[in-house]
C-alpha cells in the first residue's frame, strides 16, 4: 500500500482527489464563491462548537440530579435498601401479565394445548425466598443481554462480573471527558474495589481541518492497573511450545505467557506506536475506535438505562436477534498456540476514531 496507507485510507484519498478535480473544472468566479461558502461554513462550525460546550455544561448540571437516583438504584440492587410499596408501583404498566409470566417460567410441566383430556392447571406462584438479597447478578445479566458487552465477555470472566455491584459515570467539566467506574464486591480475583476507564474529549474544531468538526469526540483514554491475586489473572494464559534446535535436532519445550481474550483487557487500552502511518498503527487505531464506541455506549445507554437492559425492554434490535449456534472449526495445535483471535468489538455512532497523532493511550 502507498506509504503504509490502508485500503480505506487510499479510497478516501482517491475520493478527495476526484472531488478536487471536479471543483477545479469549475469557472474561476464559481470557485471564488465556493470559497466564500467555506468561510460561512467555518463560522457555523465555530458557533456549533460553542453550542456543544454549553450542552456539556448542561449535562454536568443535570448529572447532579441523576446521581441520587443512581445511588438508590445501587442500594436496591445490592440489597442494602428495600423499596416501599409506593416505590414499587408502576401505574403505567399492567403487572398481572408480568406476574403470570413469572409463574409460567417456573412451570416445567407444560400441558399440550391440543390434549383436551388433560385439565388445565394454573402454575403456582414461585415461593418467596427470604434469603435473596437485592437483585442477584443484575449487572452480569446486563452484560449477557447486550451484544456489545457479551462479545467481550469470556467464560472465565463470568464469576468476576457476578461480583460487579455498580457502574458509575463521573463527568469532567474542563477539560471535558468522563470516567467509567466499575465497582466490585470483594472477590477471589483482584484486590481493587473500583476499576476505572477515563476518556478525554475535545469540543473544538481542528485548526488544520476545521470543517470536519461534527461535535464532541473522544480522542484518548487510559485504563487502570488491576491488582490480580496470585494465579487469578484472566487476561493472561500460559502456553507451551516445542522448539527444535537447527543443528543438533534436539527438542525442548518452552513455556510463555500471552494475552488471553477477556473483558478485563478493556482496562489496558493499547498505546499508539510512534509511526502513525505504520501498518500496526492502523490496526491499533481500529481497536481504539472500537474502544471509544464501547465507552460511549456504556456511558450513554448502559448506565442510564440499566433496568431496561436487564429486563430486555431497552435492548437494540441486534441484541435479541441472535440465537446461539455451535460451530466446530478444526485448527492445528501450532495455530491454536501462536495465533490470538482479533477482539470482537462493536459500538454505536457518536464517537470518532483517534486522530492521526492521538494523545497517548496508557495505563495509570
Image: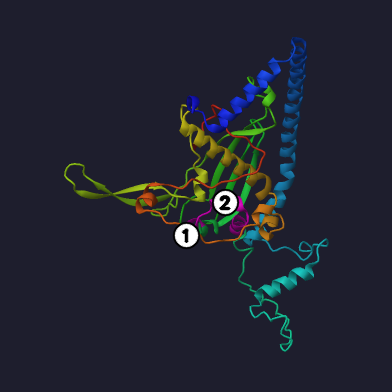
Query: Is any atom of residue 355 visible in this view?
Result: no
Answer with left or right where residue 192 lies relative to residue 240: right
Q: Based on the displayed image, in which of its 4 quarters is residue 86 positioned?
A: bottom right
Query: Is any atom of residue 339 visible in this view?
Result: yes
Q: Based on the displayed image, in which of its 4 quarters is residue 116 positioned?
A: bottom right
- Percent from the top left, x then y, of residue 256? 33, 47
Q: Which of 235 and 28 is in front in this view?
A: 28
Answer with left or right where residue 229 lies relative to residue 299: left
Q: Within 10 angstroms of label 1, few (less than 14), some, or many (20 or more) residues?
A: few
Q: Which of 299 and 249 is in front in this view?
A: 249
Chief secondary structure of the magenta span?
helix
Callout 2: SS: strand
Measured in 3D between alpha carbons, the distance from the residue under mark 2 to the one under mark 1, in whole angstroms, is 37 Å
Q: Count of labels shown?
A: 2
**Residue numbers of the magenta segment:** 139-157
User: Given contact means CB atoms under 8 Å apart, are the residues at marks 2 and 1 in contact?
Assistant: no
Q: Which of 322 and 73 is in front in this view?
A: 322
Answer with left or right where residue 190 lies relative to residue 71: left
Query: What is the number of the mark on residue 183?
Result: 2
- Percent from the top left, x then y, of residue 338? 37, 47
Callout 1: SS: loop
- Percent from the top left, x then y, of residue 326? 52, 61
Q: Mark 1 points at which residue?
A: 328
- From this viewpoint, which residue is outermost toward the front? 25
- Which residue is at a point 63% across and 73% down the rendered structure image? 130
- Percent from the top left, x then y, of residue 225? 47, 43
Relative to 285, residue 99 above or below: below
Amino acid at each position: 500500500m502507498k506509504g503504509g496507507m490502508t485500503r480505506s485510507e487510499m479510497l478516501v484519498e482517491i475520493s478527495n482527489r476526484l472531488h478536487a478535480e471536479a471543483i477545479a473544472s469549475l469557472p474561476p468566479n464559481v470557485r471564488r464563491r465556493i470559497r466564500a461558502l467555506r468561510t460561512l461554513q467555518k463560522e457555523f462550525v465555530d458557533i456549533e462548537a460553542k453550542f456543544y460546550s454549553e450542552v456539556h455544561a448542561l449535562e454536568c448540571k443535570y448529572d447532579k440530579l441523576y446521581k441520587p437516583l443512581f445511588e438508590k438504584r445501587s442500594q436496591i440492587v445490592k440489597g442494602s435498601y428495600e423499596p416501599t410499596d409506593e416505590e414499587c408501583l408502576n401505574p403505567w404498566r399492567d403487572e398481572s401479565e408480568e406476574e403470570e409470566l413469572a409463574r409460567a417460567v417456573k412451570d416445567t410441566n407444560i400441558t399440550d394445548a391440543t390434549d383436551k383430556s388433560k385439565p388445565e392447571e394454573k402454575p403456582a406462584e414461585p415461593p418467596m425466598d427470604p434469603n435473596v438479597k437485592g437483585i442477584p447478578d443484575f449487572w452480569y445479566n446486563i452484560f449477557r443481554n447486550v451484544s456489545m458487552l457479551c462479545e467481550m465477555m469470556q467464560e472465565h470472566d463470568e464469576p468476576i462480573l457476578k461480583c460487579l455491584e455498580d457502574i458509575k459515570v463521573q463527568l469532567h467539566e474542563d477539560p471535558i471527558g468522563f470516567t467509567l467506574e466499575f465497582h466490585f464486591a470483594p472477590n477471589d480475583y483482584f484486590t481493587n474495589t473500583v476499576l476505572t476507564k477515563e476518556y478525554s474529549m475535545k469540543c473544538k474544531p481542528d485548526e488544520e481541518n476545521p470543517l470536519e468538526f461534527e461535535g464532541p469526540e473522544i480522542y484518548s483514554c487510559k485504563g487502570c492497573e488491576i491488582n490480580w491475586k496470585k494465579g487469578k489473572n484472566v487476561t493472561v494464559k500460559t502456553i507451551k511450545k516445542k522448539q527444535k534446535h537447527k543443528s543438533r535436532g534436539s527438542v525442548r519445550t518452552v513455556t510463555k505467557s500471552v494475552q488471553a481474550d477477556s473483558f478485563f483487557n478493556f482496562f489496558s487500552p493499547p498505546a499508539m506506536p510512534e509511526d502513525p502511518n505504520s501498518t500496526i498503527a492502523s490496526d491499533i487505531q481500529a481497536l481504539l475506535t472500537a474502544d471509544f464506541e464501547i465507552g460511549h455506549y456504556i456511558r450513554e445507554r448502559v448506565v442510564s438505562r440499566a433496568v431496561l437492559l436487564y429486563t430486555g425492554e431497552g435492548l437494540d434490535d441486534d441484541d435479541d436477534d441472535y440465537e446461539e449456534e455451535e460451530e466446530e472449526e478444526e485448527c492445528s495445535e501450532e495455530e491454536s498456540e501462536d495465533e490470538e483471535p482479533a477482539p470482537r468489538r462493536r459500538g454505536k455512532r457518536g464517537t470518532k476514531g483517534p486522530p492521526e497523532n492521538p494523545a497517548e493511550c496508557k495505563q495509570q
